Image (cartoon, rainbow, N blue to C red):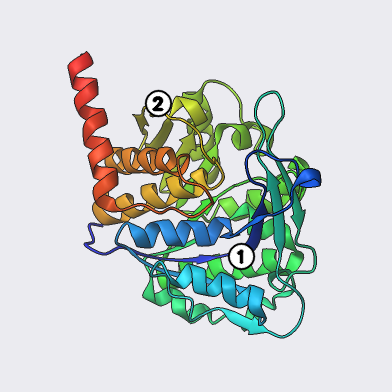
Amino acid sequence: MKKDVPSVISFGESMIRFSTKNFERIEQAHELEMRVAGAESNFAIAFARLGGRAAWISKITNNPLGRFIANKIREHGVDVSHVIWTNDYRVGLYFIEFGKKPRPTQVIYDRKNSAIANIDPNEVDWEILKDYDTFHTTGITVALSENCKKAVEIGISKAKEFGTRVSFDVNYRSKLWSPEEAFKALDPILKNVDILLVTKDDARNVLKVDGTYEEMIHTLAERYNAEVTVLTLGSEGAMALKDDRIYKAEPYELEVVDRIGAGDAFDAGFVYEYLRSGDIQKALELGIAMAAYAHTIPGDIMFVTKDELELVITQKAHAHDVLR
């Protein structure tokens, strides 16, 4: 499995993100900050910044907003040449106002009838999956439309045909569908996944798995039979299961600047190192470091280098050894 330059191709929607400044409410704001955001493009960018080869597939409206999205993703070394351009439909938007306890952070989606929701699954050149180690997507893409769901299913089927691994994050979004709708759509899809990534909350609320974390991850592994199953535990770290062995990684102490995109960063770190070395413990440690760093950076996109991450991982290990 060891590869010097692992590669991934991800599939999903990217939107324009507008956020308030200084914890303002949207109603009182005079200006909004404009950024690019999307789970699968966040993943591809983070993967590329680690030194991997990454591409991103989507369907985007050919207007200034669409070009803004593609250009920003390309800036980080992600190949966007497989994007499908259209003069129809629209670019999805979302708005975020950051809260401080007891006021929660709130997200407002404005993405209905976006270009990717209207994708024809057959207009994607799925043959390109032959050129990558892994095909990555998430439950968000499945939730966008029946067309997107079919595209994900075809993409996974083609990946299997070509011997390309499938990496999948359940990534449940309550604003897009109910837990029951999500389970009905995702349960058959997850049985064809090689790298299964799921949060403890999604495992419980969507996949209806309960018990201790160890029991939950064993249940997921038995139900879906993925090559490796990863359960992220928020402030408690993360764990992975492969060949009936459980691996664990402890979290970092951190101060939150912007938590959006941290899960995508974890996924990229884990998948990158797993493809590169096959070492699950190292993959978990890199994923946890990526997620921690993502919490400290405004916006969804990871502005980080591999050297910075290796430094914090080394410091964490050293501190742990001293405490022992």
Residue at left offset 64%, top offset 81%: 122
Q: Residue furthest bottom?
A: 87
Tell me, for residue 253, which label it has, or none.
Answer: 2
Tell me, for residue 152, which label it has, or none.
Answer: 1
Question: Which amino acid does the dot numbered 2 rest on?
Answer: Glu
Decide which of tag 2 and tag 1 comes sooner along the chain.
Answer: 1
Cα distance in 3D space between marks 2 and 1: 36 Å
Question: Which amino acid does the dot numbered 1 rest on?
Answer: Val
**Place of residue 147 in the rendered image (x, y in percent of width and height, measured from the top left):** 72, 70
Q: Is residue 169 at all visible to an observer of this figure? A: yes
Neighbor class of circle 2 (other Cα within 10 Å; few <14, some 14-19, many 20+) is few
**Place of residue 188 in the rendered image (x, y in percent of width and height, measured from the top left):** 64, 53
Residue at left offset 70%, top offset 40%: 24
Where disc 2 sits, the SS reads loop
Q: Is residue 45 left or right of residue 187?
A: left
**Place of residue 305 in the rendered image (x, y in percent of width and height, measured from the top left):** 30, 53
Residue 188 or residue 145, whichever sits in front: 145
Residue at left offset 70%, top offset 70%: 91
Q: From this view, report whether residue 149 is shown above or below residue 39.
A: below
Quadrant location of the N terminus in the rendered image: bottom left
Residue at left offset 27%, top offset 41%: 282
Where disc 1 sits, the SS reads helix
Q: Is residue 148 left or right of residue 167?
A: right
Q: Is residue 137 at all visible to an observer of this figure? A: no
Q: Quadrant of residue 106?
A: top right
Residue 263 or residue 36, whichever sits in front: 36
**Place of residue 143 in the rendered image (x, y in percent of width and height, measured from the top left):** 71, 56
